[in-house]
Amino acid sequence: AQTVTQSQPEMSVQEAETVTLSCTYDTSESDYYLFWYKQPPSRQMILVIRQEAYKQQNATENRFSVNFQKAAKSFSLKISDSQLGDAAMYFCAYRDANTGNQFYFGTGTSLTVIP
Amino acid sequence: KAGVTQTPRYLIKTRGQQVTLSCSPISGHRSVSWYQQTPGQGLQFLFEYFSETQRNKGNFPGRFSGRQFSNSRSEMNVSTLELGDSALYLCASSFWTGTGGLYEQYFGPGTRLTVT
């Protein structure tokens, strides 16, 4: 079965600084998708960024970017110019491309932004 | 468009009882997935329904069941509740983007179930 590991239960960053959240995954599939979701204290899960495994170029969404290393099965999230509103739980998620809509999530990283 | 709605938002039940949770997906979304979120286990996939059929199922006991109606609304049922079933239950609705196997998934606010 696919597994997703987030080895940093908690992280903190100074406002305006950059922070990187780590994620590794295990799969025997070659075609899949990777995601980072954000869950603020209000509990509504929001998609932050998505990466297709067949794309070599790292995805970027404004201040959020990923470092996708397919051979190493690594998928880290970089948040630049951190803002107070970035404080949340961040979940890394994996989904096979060909087996329906089943997502595998990591256990999450709680990010604190220090003013 | 209205987002994913879940009812009720909070629920307190006693061990041994059963509970039904409801999820209304975003209009036009045919896929509905359910997840159990606990502090120790994170998010764990329960099942996915697509056009009224269960398409995927996670590793949960048979006490956890679900269904989907013709309007894509979904319910999940937990029978013979145990203390360990206390969790946040998240529903997510999805639509196919038209690109390969990629679906866009949107989550609801969740139902907080407490079993005493």
Image (spheres, helix red, strand yellow):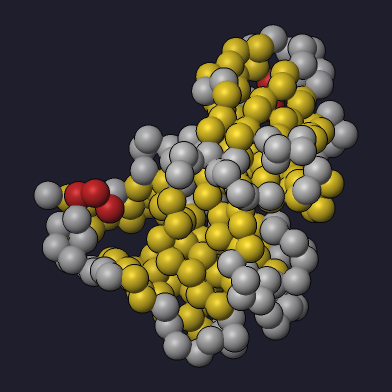
- The answer to whether one can see residue B33 in this image is no
Horizontal and vertical percent position of residue A70? 57, 84
Note whether A1 is above or below B73 in the view shown.
Answer: below
Q: At x 34% / y 71%, what residue is drawn?
A: A61
**B90 or B106, which is in the foreground?**
B106
**A74 or B74, which is in the foreground?**
B74
**B84 or A104, which is in the foreground?**
A104
Horizontal and vertical percent position of residue B91? 61, 40
Q: At x 68% / y 50%, what residue is drawn?
A: B31
Note whether A70 is above or below A106 in the view shown.
Answer: below
Horizontal and vertical percent position of residue A104? 64, 58
Note whether B11 is above or below A27 in the view shown.
Answer: above
- The answer to whether one can see residue B13 in this image is yes
Q: Quadrant of the C terminus of chain B?
A: top right
**A42 or B31, which is in the foreground?**
B31
Q: Quadrant of the N terminus of chain B?
A: top left
Horizontal and vertical percent position of residue A52? 56, 78
Query: How many dots with numbers?
Result: 0
Give left or right: position of A105 versus A87: right
Q: Residue furthest right?
A: B62
